Image: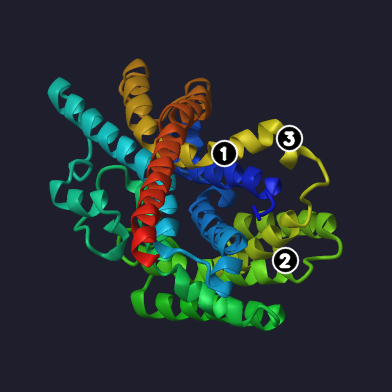
Amino acid sequence: MTPENLKPLTSMRFLAAFWVVMFHYWPKLDLGAATGWTPGLVAQGYLGVELFFVLSGFILCHVYLEAAGTGSFKYGSFLWARLARVYPLHLATLIGVGLLGGVAAIVGISIDSSILSWASLPANLTLTQAWGLAPEAGWNHPSWSISAEWFAYLCFPIFAWAAWRLRARPGLALALATGGLMTTYAVFEALAGFPLTQATIHWGALRIVPCFAYGCAAYLAWRAGGLKRPGIVAGVTTGLILVCAGLQVWDGVTVALFGVLILALAGLTGRGGPLESRTGVWLGEVSYAVYMVCVPWKLLAINGLARLNGGSEHLPWWMWVPAVLAIVPLAGLAHHLIERPARTAMRRWGERHASKGRRQIQPAAT
């Protein structure tokens, strides 16, 4: 049976992606005398990645937990489907950054030397750059989080095993996951000297673990019946997230609220509203592309507009706003021309390969 399509969660992905976009682009906005000032909510934009990580645990359990628990889960097919989901656009944007870097070098535009880090290329190609295997943050830097996601995909049977055994005790699962999240954050920061929520190529694979586990636990709560008044809870939780992020409260509190928000929005499925509109769902569908093209486009657009702005990368609002908004149609093109067709082709190839394997095995069994 096909799992229910949780449209509000699909739409929410765009908001998470755009939060990250604002985090990356805000420093390029010229605010005159106030240049350098960043609102707390924007400064916490890196937490959009945590929102994706928690959501990933929730959705993968929604789709695969039953199969994993009942023994019908096919690990190889699962990994191929996940690779088809993330790798084509990752490879395309990596190549795109390489081309941009090459052209910039030819025409004499100055770029960060780490962007074309050849020593980091093997890790980027194998999606292991967030495992501590890349010497520096190069190429399309946001893809570190896709490397972290790949780590969680590889470990999914472990998460599923734990979630399945706690399926009848969602309250305990949530308590354990929340406690694990808070403890991991506190211990890591004490030992490393910086928050785990700001780790990328170093410790990025660890960064996803507590969030993914928390998302799995939130799914168990939804599976057990969810919240009685999800609309009210969603509104209150959204307000709390905005306040906590705006005041830059400890990241662990904000991330804990993400699980509550996801649980509430899942409960709004089928009730209509803007998060179930065609526009909202489409924006959610292109959110991965938004996330992946935002930095390559930043390299191209900011450098180009700086030449029209007297050489300054701090752009006036009438240049900055179009540059930011252009990300959405660019992401739409990347989604429809690269991400979606490549994903479909890879999955069809995988299905044909699996079907061929079954036909070859069947005669030997009779």
Vertical comparison of 88 with 127: above or below = above
Q: Which amino acid type corresponds to the residue marked 1 in the rendered image?
A: Glu
Q: Which amino acid type corresponds to the residue marked 2 in the rendered image?
A: Trp
Tag count in the figure? Answer: 3
Q: Residue at x 63, y 80 (%)?
A: 173
**Residue 90: percent from the left, percent from the top?**
35, 42
Q: Nearer the viewer, residue 37 or 132?
A: 132
Q: Nearer the viewer, residue 37 or 203?
A: 203
Task: Specify the quadrant that holds the N terminus.
Answer: bottom right
**Marks 3 and 1, Cα distance to the nearest angstrom?**
12 Å
Residue 24 quadrant: top left
Dot 3 or dot 1: first in sequence order is 3
**Residue 200: percent from the left, percent from the top?**
35, 59
Q: Which amino acid type corresponds to the residue marked 3 in the rendered image?
A: Ser
Secondary structure at badge 3 equals loop
Dot 3 or dot 2: first in sequence order is 2
Q: Residue at x 53, y 73 (%)?
A: 71
> Which residue is most to the front?
366
Q: Nearer the viewer, residue 179 or 4?
A: 4
**Can residue 225 be seen by looking at this rendering?**
yes
Q: Is residue 172 left or right of residue 48?
A: right
On the image, numbered disc 2 is attached to which residue?
222
**Marks 3 and 2, Cα distance to the nearest angstrom?**
22 Å
Q: Is residue 149 left or right of residue 1?
A: left
Task: Specify the quadrant that holds the C terminus.
Answer: bottom left
On the image, numbered disc 3 is attached to which residue?
277
On the image, numbered disc 1 is attached to which residue?
285
Q: Do tag 3 and tag 1 residues touch (Cβ < 8 Å)? A: no
Q: Nearer the viewer, residue 154 or 72?
A: 72
